[in-house]
Amino acid sequence: MSDLTAKEQRSVRTTLLFLRVRAGGAWEPVAKALHVEEDTIAKVAHGKRPVTARLAIRAARLIEVGVDDLLAGTHMSSRVCPHCGHPPDDFVDEETVVTEQTTPRGFTVLDGGKQ
């Protein structure tokens, strides 16, 4: 059971999948950065286990966004695929200006500031 709503869990899962894509398609660096087992993070990301508040906080810290932004999904483009985590090929039509930033831990994240 999770303290997070279904929508909040979906946002965290999309972020986890996105991090996996950015880490070259492997769970190992994501799991290591979040201090969880690879099997655990894969199960959470694919909906076989609930997203815990603890994991959400760790993910928010990793990508350096507020927990509220992570849970609301406002930290990345709404066009990032919730099933595989791939970002869209272009951001030209976006109302959000999206730039890539690298966190101190080496992950590339999308920073979406509203215009």
Image (cartoon, rainbow, N blue to C red):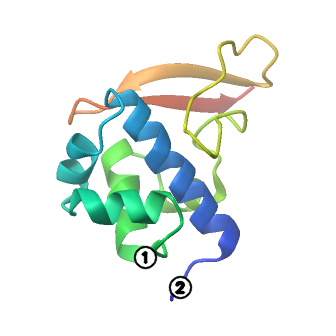
Q: Is mark 2 on a helix, strand or loop?
A: loop
Front-most of residues 86 and 93: 86
Is 43 above or below relative to 90? below
Is residue 92 left or right of 20 when viewed as pictured?
right
Tell me the quarter of the image containing the C terminus: top right
Picture quadrant of residue 21: top left
| Earlier sequence position, callout 2 versus callout 1 | 2
The percent coordinates of residue 106 (x first, y second) are: 23, 29
Is 10 above or below relative to 91? below
CB-based contact (under 8 Å), mark 2 and mark 1: yes
Residue 3, label in figure: 2
Label 2 and label 1: CA atoms lie apart by 7 Å
The percent coordinates of residue 25 (x first, y second) are: 36, 32
Q: Which amino acid does label 1 sit on?
A: Thr
Residue 52, label in figure: 1
Q: What residue type is labelled 2?
A: Asp
